[in-house]
Image: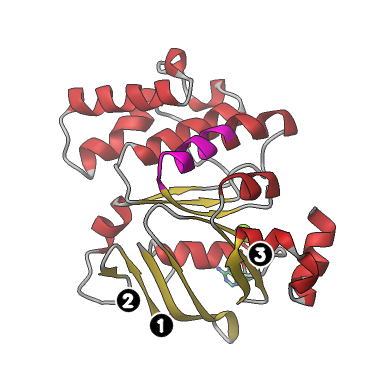
Amino acid sequence: MISIQNVNKWYGDFQVLTDCSTEVKKGEVVVVCGPSGSGKSTLIKCVNALEPFQKGDIVVDGTSVANPKTNLPKLRSRVGMVFQHFELFPHLSITENLTIAQTKVLGRGKDEAIEKGLALLDRVGLKAHAHKHPGQLSGGQQQRVAIARALAMDPVVMLFDEPTSALDPEMVNEVLDVMVQLAQEGMTMMCVTHEMGFARKVANRVIFMDKGQIVEDCDKEAFFGDINARSERAQQFLAKIL
Ligand code: ADP
Ligand code: MG
């Protein structure tokens, strides 16, 4: 579903990604971890073409991101993205947040978009809040709305970039629960997160990045099974978060 092929990216002279390659199969959940500044956000943004890269390619469900002929807005509409800071539209109601891209990007009728949005809001346990504005919800609730908003576009994959790291601790689980449910329903997911409980529960693979490189890319069982078999950099990192 996602094939990352020798991606190299520079910001000016600074090489932020070096020869990154990996694959995410349909229905797979891949967790990406690694120190701050290692390039996790950059890599995930390259997958839905929010960041350009200079070498290599990424193919999402058969569509090449690097091919200049690719319709990038169309590709982006099929890749759900959830960020650390929710990024809901503050001046719109929750219902409007859930419907605006459905009507403007996918051309759905208003009634259909509202029905879909409310069904997803119900799924993340927030149906009663449809009329409110984002500022009236807690961080955990806003992040669940952001997940519902991404799902409203019927994405073929979902990308998460540290979706719980800006939340107060007591709100982390309500968001992880939604993500676990999505994973168990078979959604293809690439998740930057340091929530290793989530990784242990639903990840198929774990990728460890350092200094712009994919240093480890292995099955969950291998990743957590014998930490001593991991690279030194991964061990040092894991020692801090496990
Ligand atoms: P992570 O998500 O792992 O913390 P990032 O992908 O955000 O890492 O950043 C990787 C590196 O790229 C960092 O050194 C960061 O400072 C640098 N970087 C990120 N965005 C930019 C940018 N727009 N311009 C220049 N450097 C950037
Ligand atoms: Mg980041």
- Can I make out residue 93 in this image? no
Where residue 179 sits: x, y (%)?
Answer: 52, 39
Contact between labelled residues 3 and 2, with CB atoms less than 8 Å apart: no
Query: Magenta span has 224?
Result: no
Instruction: Quickly name the residue at label 2.
Output: 66
Instruction: Quickly name the residue at label 1.
Output: 56
Contact between labelled residues 1 and 3, with CB atoms less than 8 Å apart: no
In depth, the one of 139 and 2 nearer the eye is 2
Query: Could you tell me which secondary element the residue under label 1 belongs to?
Result: strand
Taking the view exactly as shown, the residue that stands out farthest to the top is: 128
Left or right placement of residue 228 versus residue 61 in this view: right
Q: Is residue 242 above or below residue 59?
A: above
Q: Give the image quarter of residue 226.
A: bottom right
Q: Give the image quarter of residue 186.
A: top left
- Taking the spot 40% from the left edge, 61% from the top edge, the residue there is 25
Crowding at label 2, few (<14), some or many (≥20) Cα neighbours within 10 Å? some
Q: Is residue 215 above or below residue 201?
A: below
CA distance for labels 2 and 3: 32 Å
In depth, the one of 23 and 81 nearer the eye is 23
Query: Could you tell me which secondary element the residue under label 2 belongs to?
Result: loop
Where residue 167 sits: x, y (%)?
Answer: 67, 37
Locate the N terminus and report the quarter of the image it occupies: bottom left
Contact between labelled residues 1 and 2, with CB atoms less than 8 Å apart: yes
Dot 2 amino acid type: Ala
Instruction: Quickly name the residue at label 3.
Output: 222
Dot 3 amino acid type: Ala
In this view, the mark in front (2 or 3): 3
Tell me which image quadrant ligand 2 sits in: bottom right
Helix, strand or loop for the magenta stretch, by majority: helix
Which residues are drawn in magenta? 177-187
